[in-house]
Amino acid sequence: MENNAQNSRESQAHTHIKGPFIYTKTKVVQHQPHHLQHNRIIAGFKPGPWLESYKMLRTRCLQLMDANKWNTLAITSPSSGSGNSLTAANLAISIAMEFNRSVLLVDANFQNPGISQLFNIDNNVGLDRYLLNDIALPDLLINPGINGLVVLPAGQAILNSAEMLRSPKMVELVQELKQRYPSRIIIFDLPPLLSHDDTLGFIPAVDCTLLVIEEGYTKTEELKKSATLLKDLNVLGTVFNKASDLKIKYSVN
Protein backbone atom coordinates (compact mmCIF):
# COMPACT_ATOMS: atom_id res chain seq x y z
CA MET A 1 0.00 0.00 0.00
CA GLU A 2 2.88 2.33 0.77
CA ASN A 3 6.44 2.16 -0.46
CA ASN A 4 9.25 0.30 1.21
CA ALA A 5 9.69 3.09 3.75
CA GLN A 6 7.80 0.70 6.06
CA ASN A 7 11.00 -0.15 7.93
CA SER A 8 11.78 3.51 8.53
CA ARG A 9 8.27 3.99 9.88
CA GLU A 10 8.78 1.05 12.20
CA SER A 11 11.86 2.75 13.59
CA GLN A 12 9.91 5.97 13.98
CA ALA A 13 7.45 4.12 16.17
CA HIS A 14 10.24 3.33 18.62
CA THR A 15 11.30 6.97 18.83
CA HIS A 16 7.67 8.19 19.06
CA ILE A 17 8.10 10.48 16.06
CA LYS A 18 5.53 10.10 13.36
CA GLY A 19 6.67 11.57 10.09
CA PRO A 20 4.47 11.93 7.01
CA PHE A 21 3.51 8.71 5.29
CA ILE A 22 4.70 8.50 1.69
CA TYR A 23 2.20 6.89 -0.69
CA THR A 24 3.52 5.73 -4.05
CA LYS A 25 0.51 3.70 -5.22
CA THR A 26 -2.31 4.97 -3.03
CA LYS A 27 -4.24 7.89 -4.49
CA VAL A 28 -3.93 11.01 -2.32
CA VAL A 29 -6.68 13.64 -2.16
CA GLN A 30 -6.64 16.75 0.00
CA HIS A 31 -9.41 16.94 2.52
CA GLN A 32 -11.63 20.01 2.74
CA PRO A 33 -11.90 21.23 6.36
CA HIS A 34 -15.33 22.80 5.85
CA HIS A 35 -16.66 19.54 4.40
CA LEU A 36 -15.26 17.51 7.30
CA GLN A 37 -16.65 19.94 9.84
CA HIS A 38 -20.08 19.88 8.19
CA ASN A 39 -20.06 16.07 8.44
CA ARG A 40 -18.86 16.10 12.07
CA ILE A 41 -15.47 14.60 11.28
CA ILE A 42 -13.15 15.50 14.15
CA ALA A 43 -10.27 16.45 11.82
CA GLY A 44 -12.35 19.48 10.87
CA PHE A 45 -12.79 20.69 14.45
CA LYS A 46 -10.72 22.50 17.00
CA PRO A 47 -10.11 20.52 20.23
CA GLY A 48 -13.33 20.03 22.10
CA PRO A 49 -15.66 17.47 23.74
CA TRP A 50 -16.11 15.38 20.57
CA LEU A 51 -12.39 15.06 19.94
CA GLU A 52 -11.60 14.15 23.53
CA SER A 53 -14.41 11.60 23.64
CA TYR A 54 -13.07 9.83 20.56
CA LYS A 55 -9.54 9.90 21.96
CA MET A 56 -10.75 8.17 25.11
CA LEU A 57 -12.68 5.63 23.04
CA ARG A 58 -9.53 5.07 20.97
CA THR A 59 -7.44 4.45 24.06
CA ARG A 60 -9.78 1.85 25.52
CA CYS A 61 -10.21 0.05 22.20
CA LEU A 62 -6.48 -0.08 21.56
CA GLN A 63 -5.74 -1.30 25.08
CA LEU A 64 -8.06 -4.27 24.64
CA MET A 65 -6.98 -4.97 21.06
CA ASP A 66 -3.28 -4.80 21.91
CA ALA A 67 -3.76 -7.06 24.93
CA ASN A 68 -5.33 -9.70 22.68
CA LYS A 69 -3.07 -9.03 19.68
CA TRP A 70 -6.07 -8.03 17.57
CA ASN A 71 -5.87 -5.60 14.66
CA THR A 72 -9.21 -5.94 12.86
CA LEU A 73 -12.36 -4.24 14.16
CA ALA A 74 -15.92 -4.32 12.83
CA ILE A 75 -18.28 -1.44 13.61
CA THR A 76 -22.02 -1.94 13.31
CA SER A 77 -25.31 -0.96 14.92
CA PRO A 78 -28.63 -2.69 15.60
CA SER A 79 -30.51 -0.56 13.04
CA SER A 80 -29.84 2.12 10.44
CA GLY A 81 -29.29 5.78 11.31
CA SER A 82 -27.36 5.17 14.52
CA GLY A 83 -24.16 6.72 13.22
CA ASN A 84 -21.81 3.76 12.92
CA SER A 85 -20.19 5.18 9.74
CA LEU A 86 -19.48 8.44 11.55
CA THR A 87 -18.13 6.52 14.53
CA ALA A 88 -15.93 4.40 12.26
CA ALA A 89 -14.52 7.47 10.50
CA ASN A 90 -13.82 9.43 13.66
CA LEU A 91 -12.33 6.46 15.49
CA ALA A 92 -10.09 5.74 12.48
CA ILE A 93 -8.80 9.32 12.46
CA SER A 94 -8.18 9.36 16.19
CA ILE A 95 -6.17 6.11 15.96
CA ALA A 96 -4.20 7.50 13.01
CA MET A 97 -3.19 10.41 15.27
CA GLU A 98 -1.20 7.99 17.42
CA PHE A 99 2.58 8.12 16.93
CA ASN A 100 3.02 4.47 16.02
CA ARG A 101 -0.29 3.69 14.31
CA SER A 102 -1.76 3.62 10.86
CA VAL A 103 -5.34 2.77 9.90
CA LEU A 104 -7.13 1.23 6.96
CA LEU A 105 -10.83 2.15 6.96
CA VAL A 106 -12.89 -0.23 4.81
CA ASP A 107 -16.42 0.64 3.79
CA ALA A 108 -18.03 -2.80 3.65
CA ASN A 109 -21.59 -1.49 3.65
CA PHE A 110 -22.77 -2.22 0.12
CA GLN A 111 -26.36 -1.52 1.18
CA ASN A 112 -25.75 2.13 2.09
CA PRO A 113 -22.09 3.15 1.72
CA GLY A 114 -21.33 6.29 3.70
CA ILE A 115 -17.58 6.61 4.21
CA SER A 116 -16.85 8.19 0.83
CA GLN A 117 -19.52 10.82 1.39
CA LEU A 118 -18.13 11.70 4.81
CA PHE A 119 -14.68 12.34 3.32
CA ASN A 120 -15.95 13.63 -0.04
CA ILE A 121 -13.98 11.05 -2.02
CA ASP A 122 -14.77 9.05 -5.16
CA ASN A 123 -16.98 6.00 -4.58
CA ASN A 124 -17.22 4.85 -8.20
CA VAL A 125 -14.65 2.14 -7.61
CA GLY A 126 -13.73 0.32 -4.45
CA LEU A 127 -14.13 -3.00 -2.68
CA ASP A 128 -16.73 -4.06 -5.25
CA ARG A 129 -14.11 -4.01 -8.02
CA TYR A 130 -11.72 -6.08 -5.95
CA LEU A 131 -14.33 -8.74 -5.23
CA LEU A 132 -15.97 -8.87 -8.66
CA ASN A 133 -13.33 -7.79 -11.16
CA ASP A 134 -10.01 -8.74 -9.54
CA ILE A 135 -8.78 -5.15 -9.58
CA ALA A 136 -5.57 -4.89 -7.56
CA LEU A 137 -6.19 -3.55 -4.06
CA PRO A 138 -3.55 -0.75 -4.21
CA ASP A 139 -5.39 0.73 -7.20
CA LEU A 140 -8.53 1.19 -5.10
CA LEU A 141 -7.10 2.80 -1.97
CA ILE A 142 -7.36 6.51 -1.16
CA ASN A 143 -5.54 8.65 1.37
CA PRO A 144 -7.99 11.47 2.27
CA GLY A 145 -5.20 13.89 3.13
CA ILE A 146 -4.95 12.67 6.74
CA ASN A 147 -1.57 11.29 7.78
CA GLY A 148 -1.65 7.57 8.52
CA LEU A 149 -5.19 6.96 7.24
CA VAL A 150 -6.11 5.02 4.08
CA VAL A 151 -9.69 4.46 2.93
CA LEU A 152 -11.07 1.61 0.82
CA PRO A 153 -14.48 2.80 -0.47
CA ALA A 154 -17.31 0.34 -1.00
CA GLY A 155 -17.82 1.23 -4.65
CA GLN A 156 -21.15 0.41 -6.23
CA ALA A 157 -23.91 -1.55 -4.55
CA ILE A 158 -23.78 -5.33 -4.92
CA LEU A 159 -27.10 -7.16 -5.06
CA ASN A 160 -25.73 -10.31 -3.44
CA SER A 161 -23.66 -8.35 -0.93
CA ALA A 162 -24.18 -10.86 1.89
CA GLU A 163 -22.70 -13.67 -0.19
CA MET A 164 -19.80 -11.46 -1.29
CA LEU A 165 -18.91 -10.37 2.24
CA ARG A 166 -18.65 -13.93 3.48
CA SER A 167 -17.07 -15.25 0.28
CA PRO A 168 -13.67 -16.99 0.45
CA LYS A 169 -12.13 -14.03 -1.39
CA MET A 170 -13.31 -11.56 1.26
CA VAL A 171 -12.17 -13.79 4.10
CA GLU A 172 -8.78 -14.15 2.40
CA LEU A 173 -8.56 -10.36 2.08
CA VAL A 174 -9.13 -9.91 5.81
CA GLN A 175 -6.41 -12.43 6.60
CA GLU A 176 -4.01 -10.86 4.12
CA LEU A 177 -4.52 -7.40 5.60
CA LYS A 178 -4.01 -8.72 9.12
CA GLN A 179 -0.76 -10.42 8.26
CA ARG A 180 0.73 -7.89 5.82
CA TYR A 181 0.53 -4.95 8.23
CA PRO A 182 0.29 -6.35 11.78
CA SER A 183 0.83 -2.88 13.31
CA ARG A 184 -1.99 -1.37 11.27
CA ILE A 185 -5.55 -1.23 12.60
CA ILE A 186 -8.16 -2.26 10.02
CA ILE A 187 -11.68 -0.94 10.66
CA PHE A 188 -14.67 -2.31 8.74
CA ASP A 189 -17.79 -0.17 8.56
CA LEU A 190 -20.68 -2.63 8.23
CA PRO A 191 -24.44 -2.54 7.60
CA PRO A 192 -26.85 -2.62 10.58
CA LEU A 193 -26.84 -5.98 12.31
CA LEU A 194 -30.63 -6.50 12.38
CA SER A 195 -31.47 -5.08 8.95
CA HIS A 196 -29.30 -7.31 6.75
CA ASP A 197 -27.55 -10.65 7.09
CA ASP A 198 -24.35 -9.21 5.55
CA THR A 199 -22.93 -8.24 8.93
CA LEU A 200 -23.62 -11.39 10.92
CA GLY A 201 -22.07 -13.50 8.17
CA PHE A 202 -18.93 -11.37 7.99
CA ILE A 203 -18.17 -10.52 11.63
CA PRO A 204 -16.60 -13.91 12.52
CA ALA A 205 -13.79 -13.10 10.05
CA VAL A 206 -12.58 -10.15 12.15
CA ASP A 207 -11.08 -10.04 15.62
CA CYS A 208 -13.64 -7.93 17.45
CA THR A 209 -16.74 -5.76 17.14
CA LEU A 210 -17.96 -2.38 18.40
CA LEU A 211 -21.72 -1.81 18.57
CA VAL A 212 -23.09 1.72 18.04
CA ILE A 213 -26.47 2.58 19.57
CA GLU A 214 -28.39 5.85 19.34
CA GLU A 215 -29.87 7.72 22.28
CA GLY A 216 -33.64 7.87 22.10
CA TYR A 217 -33.79 5.71 18.98
CA THR A 218 -32.32 2.25 19.55
CA LYS A 219 -34.98 0.12 21.20
CA THR A 220 -34.27 -2.12 24.17
CA GLU A 221 -35.46 -5.17 22.25
CA GLU A 222 -33.09 -4.34 19.38
CA LEU A 223 -30.19 -4.11 21.79
CA LYS A 224 -31.11 -7.42 23.44
CA LYS A 225 -31.43 -9.17 20.08
CA SER A 226 -28.08 -7.75 18.95
CA ALA A 227 -26.44 -8.96 22.16
CA THR A 228 -27.85 -12.44 21.56
CA LEU A 229 -26.53 -12.55 18.00
CA LEU A 230 -23.07 -11.40 19.11
CA LYS A 231 -22.82 -13.41 22.33
CA ASP A 232 -20.22 -15.86 20.99
CA LEU A 233 -18.07 -13.17 19.36
CA ASN A 234 -15.53 -10.70 20.72
CA VAL A 235 -17.50 -7.52 21.43
CA LEU A 236 -15.34 -4.65 22.67
CA GLY A 237 -18.37 -2.74 23.92
CA THR A 238 -20.99 -0.21 22.88
CA VAL A 239 -20.89 3.41 21.77
CA PHE A 240 -23.80 5.59 22.87
CA ASN A 241 -24.07 7.99 19.93
CA LYS A 242 -25.94 11.30 19.55
CA ALA A 243 -26.03 11.78 23.31
CA SER A 244 -27.82 14.90 24.50
CA ASP A 245 -24.72 16.40 26.13
CA LEU A 246 -22.97 16.51 22.69
CA LYS A 247 -20.43 13.90 23.70
CA ILE A 248 -20.29 10.30 22.67
CA LYS A 249 -20.61 7.88 25.54
CA TYR A 250 -19.26 4.39 25.48
CA SER A 251 -18.93 1.21 27.45
CA VAL A 252 -15.85 -0.76 26.52
CA ASN A 253 -15.27 -4.05 28.28
Image (cartoon, rainbow, N blue to C red):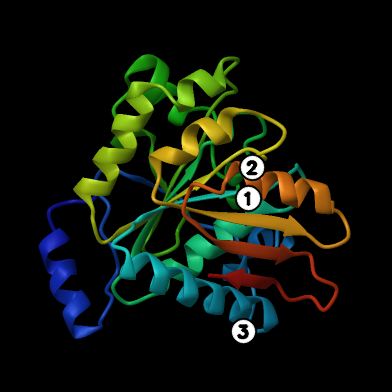
Against 14, residue 177 (above or below) is: above
Amino acid at circle 3: Pro
Where's residue 235, x and y in %?
A: 52, 56
How far, Cα to Cα, is label 1 from label 2?
Answer: 6 Å
- Crowding around mark 3 (Cα neighbors within 10 Å: few <14, some 14 to 19, many 20+) is few
In the displayed structure image, the side of residue 110 where residue 71 appears, left or right: left
Say if mark 1 contacts mark 2, CB within 8 Å: yes
Tag 3 secondary structure: loop
Q: Earlier in the sequence, mark 1 or mark 3?
A: 3
The residue at 23%/56% (across/down) is 182
Q: Which mark is residue 85?
A: 1
Amino acid at circle 1: Ser
Tell us which disc is closer to us: 1 or 2: 1
Q: Which mark is residue 30?
A: none
Tag 1 secondary structure: helix
Report which residue position mark 2 lands on.
Answer: 114
Q: Quadrant of residue 135?
A: top left
In the current view of this chain or complex, which residue is farthest to the right?
Answer: 216
Say if mark 1 contacts mark 3, CB within 8 Å: no
Tag 2 secondary structure: loop
How far, Cα to Cα, is label 3 from label 2?
Answer: 25 Å
Report which residue position mark 3 lands on.
Answer: 47
Residue closest to the eye, 89 or 202: 202
